[in-house]
Image (spheres, helix red, strand yellow):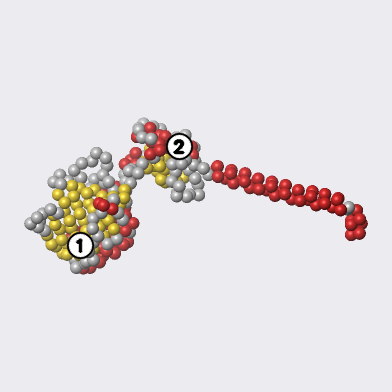
């Protein structure tokens, strides 16, 4: 058989056959490349969402473009601001318990059917808005109550940060503003002394020195660590626009500073609220 094949194929015929085989291989490879390219392009297109969705927010189920655009358009219309000033900072798939997406209007009758959809959080860098939507974005509803209770922190400018604590100081609170417009500083020392002074008091006439136990100081330090107070480092939770006569509190530990005001205290993150409560308990228990 080998001899017959050798005699059958002339040199030119062998070259032609080789060329045909190579052409077929290249054709198959090219087709495979085209298929792979088309598949990749299709995948990229299907995962594409609104440019306003936070790029670092990687989730297994992407927010559909139609839903994102519907939410952004509705909020821009309500607030009278440009869509480009808004950004979707979080979203999650939800199954709402009724046809009103759990946000019924006055005197509205809601079907009891379960409705798949999305919970979407939008920000303009100063505050957040929370939306309930159906699966396609044809129905979007603003959760006004939840939106009112969200605060967006801003970074405290370096030039406005208070000085770092001395080594023997555990914690410091600076309060300023209010009707009187006075500023007070209270520091907690390692030995349990709690010293309060009024900034600008030339005679130091309002200085007070009280004490808590060293054990209380150590418990407070451990609580700051458990509540992860350091994660709020150099953040400020501002007062609502138009608010007046509020008191601003600047709290500093050895790990950083955070700022809030008495108007927004109940809307702070839970861990920060707990840290503020623990500090106030220390101050109230001092003798």
Q: Which mark is residue 188?
A: 1
Tell me the distance, in whole angstroms, between the alpha carbons under discs 1 and 2.
50 Å
Give SS at disc 2. Answer: helix
Q: Looking at the picture, tell me which residue is in the foreground, 136 or 206.
A: 206
Task: Tell me which residue sits at (47%, 40%) in the image.
Answer: 50
**Residue 146 in view of the camera:** no
* Residue topped by disc 2: 69
Relative side of 19 to 128, left or right: right
Left/right of residue 191 with respect to residue 229 in the rendered view:
left
Residue at the (37%, 42%) spot, across then down:
123
* Residue at image coords 31%, 58%: 230
The x and y percentages for residue 281 are: 21, 58
* Quadrant of residue 173 within the rendered picture: bottom left
Residue 66 higher or lower than 217, as above or below? above
Q: Which one is earlier in the sequence, the residue at label 1 or at label 2?
A: 2
Where the N terminus falls, by quadrant?
Answer: bottom right
Residue 233 in the image, given as x and y percentages of width and height: 31, 56
Instruction: Residue at the far front: name it.
Output: 12
* Front residue of this view, candidates 19 and 249: 19
Residue at the (10%, 54%) spot, across then down: 201
Q: Can I make out residue 219 in this image?
A: yes
> Residue 144 got which mark?
none
| In this picture, residue 59 sits left or right of residue 277 | right
For the C terminus, which image quadrant?
bottom left
Check disc 1 and report its element: helix, strand or loop: strand
Q: Where's residue 101, x and y in %?
A: 42, 38
Give the quadrant of residue 169. bottom left
Image coordinates of residue 185 in percent, x first then y, are: 17, 56
For the image, the number of numbered tags is: 2
* Discs 1, 2 touching: Cβ within 8 Å: no
Count residues near mark 2 (Cα–Cα under 10 Å), then give few for <14, some for 14-19, many for 20+: some
């Amino acid at each position: 058989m080998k001899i017959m094949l050798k005699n059958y194929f002339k040199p030119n015929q062998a070259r032609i056959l080789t060329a045909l085989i190579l052409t077929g291989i290249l054709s198959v490879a090219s087709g495979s490349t085209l298929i792979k390219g088309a598949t990749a392009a299709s995948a990229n297109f299907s995962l594409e969402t609104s440019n306003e969705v936070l790029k670092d927010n990687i989730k297994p189920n992407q927010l559909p473009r139609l839903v994102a655009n519907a939410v952004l358009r509705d909020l821009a219309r309500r607030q009278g601001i440009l869509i480009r000033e808004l950004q979707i900072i979080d979203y999650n798939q939800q199954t709402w318990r009724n046809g009103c997406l759990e946000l019924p209007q006055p005197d509205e009758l809601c079907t009891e059917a379960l409705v798949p959809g999305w919970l979407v959080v939008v920000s303009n860098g100063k505050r957040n808005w929370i939306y309930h939507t159906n699966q396609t974005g044809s129905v979007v509803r603003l959760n006004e109550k939840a939106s009112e209770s969200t605060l967006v922190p801003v970074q405290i400018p370096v030039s406005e940060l208070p000085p770092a604590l001395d080594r023997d100081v555990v914690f410091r609170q600076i309060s300023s503003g209010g009707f009187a417009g006075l500023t007070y500083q209270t520091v907690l020392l390692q030995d349990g002394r709690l010293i309060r002074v009024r900034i600008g008091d030339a005679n130091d006439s309002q200085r007070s020195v009280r004490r808590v136990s060293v054990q209380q100081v150590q418990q407070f330090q451990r609580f700051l660590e458990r509540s992860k107070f350091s994660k709020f480092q150099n953040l400020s939770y501002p007062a609502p626009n138009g608010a007046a006569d509020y008191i601003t509190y600047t709290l500093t530990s050895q790990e950083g500073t955070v700022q809030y005001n008495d108007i927004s205290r109940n809307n702070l993150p839970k861990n920060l609220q707990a840290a503020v409560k623990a500090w106030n308990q220390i101050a109230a228990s001092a003798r």
